[in-house]
Amino acid sequence: MSADKPRYANFPERDLKVVIGEHINATNTKLLTKLTIGKYEMSFLQQENGSNTLKAVREAVGILAKAESMAIETDEKHREYLGITKAGNAEKIVGLWILTPFELTQSAHLIWCRWSELGNTAKTGVAFKVNTKFTADDIANLIRAAQKNAVSLAAGEAFTLKGNPPPRFQKKTTASALPVAEAVPA
């Protein structure tokens, strides 16, 4: 990817631009920019996997909302998404968009998560996950990833998705670089 021309993801909310950053594999990069097939074009298996994902989202967001005293708002009648779920209070807002599959022959679908912290230190975090079926634990981990990715953005600034660098690019710590415990006099 060149630094001159950013590649934008097809993020469901239009008020936040999401740029595909480094260390995201080519398959995910391609999927993040594609359009989905829509709710009325799905096969039976795709519909079944989607309904299982919706149940998992309801369960995970329900647990989070109860713990954080958040109000939940859902929309399952949207024609482009399997469902949209938002939970929020005066301090935080969590939004989840469950997209339909990308092709008629596959059942993998994408979930976007946006974590927003309101107040003096306004932060925004975005995470995504592609899978055929999701569990409530997968959704909870996705929400935690979006929360961990939260950064302060200036007005109109795009959020940059970053992947995990391969192990060969991570710095190695040697035994000599680790701090040595000092001897305590007796």
Image (cartoon, grey):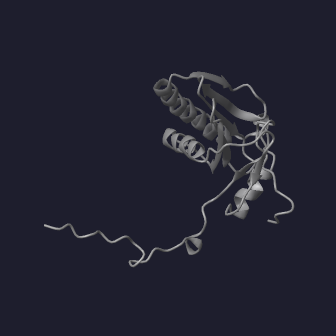
Single out the residue that lies furthest toward the front.
185
| Residue 169 sits in quarter | bottom right
Residue 1 rendering spot, x and y as whole percentages: 79, 65
In the picture, the quarter occupied by the C terminus is: bottom left
Q: Position of residue 41 (x, y in %)?
A: 79, 39
Residue 103 appears in view: no
The residue lying furthest to the left in this view is: 186
User: Going 68% across and 45% down the picture, which residue do you hit?
Assistant: 110
Query: Does residue 51 lie above or below 152 as drawn?
Result: above
Q: Is residue 55 left or right of residue 102?
A: left
Q: Is residue 103 left or right of residue 120?
A: right
- Residue at image point 72% right, 45% down: 101
Q: How many marks?
A: 0
Identify which residue, 28 or 52, lies in the foreground.
28
Residue 180 occupies quadrant: bottom left
In depth, the one of 162 and 101 nearer the eye is: 162
As rendered, which of 127 and 181 lies closer to the eye?
Answer: 181
Residue drawn at (65%, 24%) of the image: 74
Q: Name the residue furthest right.
A: 5
Q: Nearer the viewer, residue 115 or 185?
A: 185
Tell me if residue 54 comes above or below residue 172 in the rendering. above
Q: Position of residue 116 (x, y in %)?
A: 64, 35
Relative to 161, say whether 84 is above or below: above
Q: Position of residue 18 (x, y in %)?
A: 76, 47
Q: Report the side of 158 relative to 121 (left or right).
A: right
- Which quadrant of the structure image shows residue 184? bottom left
One can see residue 51 in this view = yes
